[in-house]
Image: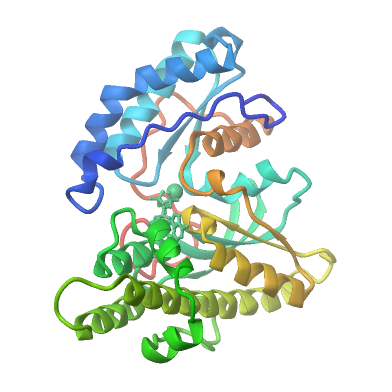
Amino acid sequence: MDGNGTILSNTILSQLDDHRIFGGVVPEIAARAHMDHLDRLIKGAMDEAGLSFADLSGVAATCGPGLIGGVMVGMMAGKAIAAAAGKPFIAVNHLEAHALTPRLSDQSLQFPYLLLLVSGGHTQILVVEDVGVYHRWGTTLDDALGECFDKAAKLMGLPYPGGPNLERAANQCSDLDAALTRFPLPRPMMHRPDCDFSFSGLKTAVRHHVDALPPGELQMSDVAAIAASFQASVRDVVADRCKRAMDQFKKSYPAHTTPTIVVAGGVAANMAVRGALEDLAAAKGFTFVAPPLKLCSDNGAMIAWAGIERLRRGDTSPLNFAARPRWPLDPDAEPKTGAGI
Ligand code: ATP
Ligand code: FE
C-alpha cells in the first residue's frame, strides 16, 4: 500500500480447502500452512507492486489477537523483513485493522465514529475516538455473529464457511412472510436497555426447526426459508442494538453534528446487515459507511492501512514485541464472555 492508501497488491491465499473436512479452522494446520506459503505470497505481492524491501517506509504485521501459531509466523516474517531492510516495524491489532478499514475506503471519515464490529470472533459496538482509543459500549454475551451464521449454516447442511452460503440461500427465498410464519425465530436482547448481543439462542432455535423437518435430505426451499427467517432476526437485532447506541452517541457527543455509524468485520459483507444499518442511519440522521465487500473479510490491505495510520503518528513497535492471543480494543471494558472478547 502506498502512503495515500492506494492498494498496490492485496494477495489472499485461502486455506479453506485444508480445513473444510474438519468443518472449522484447525490451529496446527493453519500455522503450518502459513509457514509453507508465506514467503511465496510476500514475494508475489512485492512483484505485483513492483517494489523491493528497500523501497518500503515500514513493515506492518498482525500481532494478535487470534490463533497464535499463524500470528507468530506472520509476525516473525514481518519483523525479519523490517530488521533486514532497516525499516520500522508496526505491530497491528487485527481488530483495530477491521475498525480502521472504513477510513481506508472513505478517507473523509473523521473520528469519533460509532462502529459495529461483526466478525467470526467478535460482535461489539464501539466508539472509535482515535487510532488506539476505543470505548466498548456493547459486546456479545456468548457467540459472535459470524460464528452464529457459520453454526446455523452447518445445521442447515450448508457448506463451510457458512456465512456467505447462508446469505446466498436466504436470497433464494421467494416468500419472506411465509418463511417468518413457518420458521419463526427469536430476536435475542431486543429492547434491553444496553448495547449487548446474544446469539446462542438463535442458533438453538434454528436447530429445533431443522430437527422438526421430515427426516431425509433437507429441501432447498426449506433451507432458503429458514435462512431468510434467520437473516430477518439478525437484521432486527442489529438495528435495535445500534439504534440504542446511536441515541447514546448523540447524548455523549452533542457537538458532533454529523454523526457516523460504520460497520466492519467479515459479517459486514452481509447485505441484510448493511441494509439494516443503512435504513437505520437514514432514519436517525447518521451517515453510514461500510467498506467494499472485499475489504470486510480478513485481508492484507486492512493490516497495511492500520500500519499506515500508526506510522503517520510515529507509533512504531520494538522488534521484541510479543504476539498477543488476547488483545481487546478497549482494555478497560469488562470481559463478558470467553477468550478474545
Ligand atoms: P475476528 O476478526 O473476530 O478475529 P475472523 O477474522 O475469523 O474473526 P472475519 O474474517 O473478520 O473473522 O470474518 C469471517 C466471518 O464473517 C465468518 O464467520 C463468515 O461466515 C462471516 N461472513 C463473511 N461473509 C459473510 C456474509 N456475506 N454473510 C454473513 N456472514 C459472513
Ligand atoms: Fe477478522
Residue 177's place in the image compared with 81, above or below, is: below
Residue occupying image coordinates x 50% and y 37%: 92
Which of 326 and 241 lies nearest the eye of the viewer?
241
Q: Where ligand 1 lies, by quadrant?
A: bottom left
Q: Quarter-wise, where is residue 178 in the image?
A: bottom left
Residue 296 location, x and y as percent?
A: 53, 49
Which of 242 and 322 lies nearest the eye of the viewer?
242
Residue occupying image coordinates x 49% and y 34%: 300
Q: Which quadrant is the N terminus positioned in?
A: top right
Residue occupying image coordinates x 43% and y 79%: 229
User: In the rendered view, does 262 fall on the left or right side of 255?
Assistant: left
Residue 136 visible, this orientation: no
Residue 202's place in the image compared with 38, above or below, is: below
User: In the rendered view, does 318 fall on the left or right side of 49?
Assistant: left
Residue 20's place in the image compared with 167, above or below, is: above
Residue 34 visible, this orientation: yes
Residue 66 location, x and y as percent?
A: 35, 46
Q: Which quadrant is the C terminus positioned in?
A: bottom left
Residue 167 location, x and y as percent?
A: 45, 63
In this view, the residue farthest toward the left is 215
Residue 153's place in the image compared with 331, above or below, is: below
Residue occupying image coordinates x 32% and y 32%: 72
